[in-house]
Amino acid sequence: MRLTKVYGGELMSTLLRISAVALALSAAVRSQVIPNTGQQITPLAPSGAKFMPLIPGLADNPTWVAGQAVTSISSPDHKTLLVLTSGYNRVNYTSGPKAGSRNPADSNEYVFVYDISNGAPVQKQVLQVSDTGSSSRTPAPRLLTRILRRR
């Protein structure tokens, strides 16, 4: 009986030390908040990983953020990264008589082109595509591969 109590005490002491170390590590690692979601990127993400909003820079709505990034591809030389969005990128007019109704010219899918040759991604271009092919005969990865070949 006494052996069980000592073993239990040692086990509890070890667990408390492990918990203290885990708390110290989690406090030292800062997570990044993903805007408008209440979510955070895990502290276990690769070193230097960042969440970057996909802002296509629309002339009539420059701060609008695209959503639903579904796939990405890196060029064979690892200098270019393409990120494809899909889903419900529906943009509404923000002012004027049509305010609040859908703006069909901006309600597209997007391919974001990044220069990744120096480590940190730098947005170089945004391509609007009316249909990414995610559900048609041209699967999304094939679309991105075609775009990379043309660059």
Image (cartoon, rainbow, N blue to C red):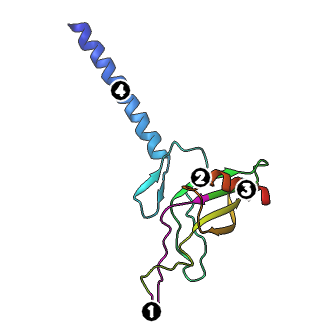
Could you tell me the amino acid type at mark 3? Answer: Arg
Mark 3 surroundings: few (<14), some (14-19) or many (≥20) residues within 10 A: few
- For discs 1 and 4, the disc positioned in front in the rendered view: 1
Q: Quadrant of residue 82?
A: bottom right
Q: Which of pointers 2 and 4 lies earlier in the amino acid sequence?
A: 4
Could you tell me the amino acid type at mark 2? Answer: Thr
Label ID, residue 97: 1
Q: Check if mark 3's residue and mark 4's residue have beta carbons within 8 Å.
A: no
According to the image, label 3 marks what residue? Answer: 146
Residue at position x 56%, y 83% in the image: 60
Residue 120 in view, yes or no:
no
According to the image, label 4 marks what residue? Answer: 15
Q: Which of pointers 3 and 4 lies earlier in the amino acid sequence?
A: 4
Question: Is 144 rendered above or below residue 94?
Answer: above
According to the image, label 2 marks what residue? Answer: 71
Residue at position x 45%, y 43% in the image: 26
Residue 121 in view, yes or no:
yes
Could you tell me the amino acid type at mark 1? Answer: Pro
Dominant secondary structure, magenta: loop
Mark 2 surroundings: few (<14), some (14-19) or many (≥20) residues within 10 A: some
Instruction: State which region is magenta.
Output: 84-98
Q: Which of pointers 1 and 3 lies earlier in the amino acid sequence?
A: 1
Question: Is 61 rendered above or below residue 31?
Answer: below
Could you tell me the amino acid type at mark 4? Answer: Leu
